[in-house]
Amino acid sequence: MADTAISPQSASLSATAAGRPEHFDVLIVGAGLSGIDAAYHLQTKCPTKSFTILESRNALGGTWDLFRYPGIRSDSDMYTLGFGFRPWRDKKSIAGGPVILKYLQETAREFGIDRKIQFGYQVNRASWSSPHALWTVDATGPEGNPARFTCNFLHMCTGYYDYSEGYMPGWPAMDRYRGLLVHPQHWPEDLDYKGKRIVVIGSGATAVTLVPELAKSAAHVTMLQRSPSYIVARPSEDPIAKWMLRYLPASVAHHFVRWKNVLLGMYFYNLARRKPDGTKKVIQGYVREFLGPDYDVEKHFSPRYNPWDQRLCLVPDGDLFLAIRAGKVSIATDEIETFTETGLRLKSGEEIPADIIVTATGLKLKLLGGLQFSIDGAPINPSQSLGYKGMMNSDIPNFAWCFGYTNASWTLKCDLTSKYICRLLNYMDAHGYAYCTPRRRDPSILEQPALTLTSGYLQRSSEILPKQGSKKPWRLYQNYAMDMAALKFSKLNDGTMEFTRMKNGNRKA
């Protein structure tokens, strides 16, 4: 650990036209799951710290307020996706988007977090001043006017995808199509699809969510996939959780259910990585049980990759398989040759008529809300830095970001991150430090991709993703137990984190 001291500049920071910028000890960006979690822990564990949450949209909830397509739901169980400090109490473990959004709204209201959110602020730039131990954050406000904030610690909870647009690959003759073309990220509220012929292009989590829901009232739904995904059925209600909640005190039951699901998830993930062929056979065996021996599982449900090379898709109560069995849904595994006036023509020559085509073709990544960074006047690119414990960046002071698991519930990692930040802030206060900076000191550490999944949305954006190192604390484990050891119980003063005091004890001039 390096302990350095610097002298503050005498010049004051520039003020906005309306006066000096609003200052907070901690600035949280994003009012979704991770932002609400971060705010709760900050006001609980660091009660003397002032903070605010800047949210670019006009409502809290993040993903669960943005996406409004039919059937939107969790693809992780809510006992782990929900907050540890306010357990999930709905009977369904795999829950619908509106129920999840209500849970987030009630949580924010119950703990007064909703009063800490400033809506309609799109952050644009963040500039760090070492002499002042201060971030200056420039944003665009609700009326389009510039706004400025300062903070000692900046915590990004913006998720990882672009809220303004989804990924749309180009296909030949799209402009010829005379029907309705819809992307799930911008689902029209008044879209009437009753009795319509629908094609959903895609095979990921969004597609397998949409298809069975649309099939309830559409004339027919075709899920068109270039290649299959692994799809696993799970009960929407957790029978073990129901039993525990019936016979045990609620707090005890929720604790055990949460850890039961964490450990089972870790076990099956590690089993799939160790024994991919066996895991593949088991998954396909369950699909055959739903669809029968005559269904071509090999063609439509046998991916080219191993389990967990990409994230598995979850279907509650086997709803997709049941819709296929009922004849309401069909799967087409082929590539698009061209759009036609009335639908699609595939490379096999098959033509699929469609009144509505839904392009469930994935997300566009946009890390850290597209924020531009500079340190002491020099522009920096966080994607060129090395991730420290999966939550901070090398050589960037007093800065952290929430990035959840790719193989488990998002909230689990974000919760550990928020608690660690509180430990870090309290440690710095106790020892008189103004800021902390992860430093890459070991030359033997090799750079590696932070995420190893082969999913298209990650491969398309590999150049903007941060790197991980070959050794701890730069290694990203995607393992809740190991991260708990690294973030909850490890030393803060670990020889990698550099702590800095101001010479006169002040944090800013």
Image: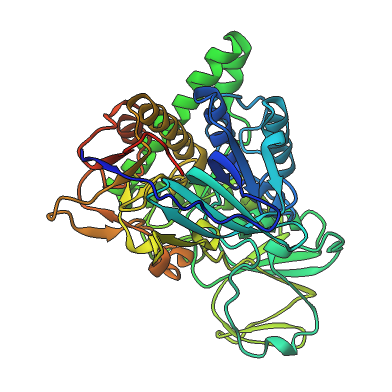
The residue depicted at 52 percent of the width and 53 percent of the height is 13
Q: Quadrant of residue 373?
A: bottom left
The residue depicted at 56 percent of the width and 84 percent of the height is 348
Q: Position of residue 356 (x, y in %)?
A: 77, 72
Q: Is residue 301 left or right of residue 323?
A: left
Q: Position of residue 457 (x, y in %)?
A: 49, 65
Q: Position of residue 273 (x, y in %)?
A: 30, 48
The residue depicted at 52 percent of the width and 33 percent of the height is 80
Q: Quadrant of residue 169?
A: bottom right
- The single residue placed furthest to the front in the displayed view is 10
The residue depicted at 73 percent of the width and 64 percent of the height is 186
Residue 283 to residue 461: above or below: above
Residue 188 visible here: yes
Residue 269 to residue 164: above or below: above
Q: Is residue 78 left or right of residue 297?
A: right
Image quarter of the N terminus: top left
Residue 217 to residue 264: above or below: below
Q: Nearer the viewer, residue 145 or 403?
A: 145
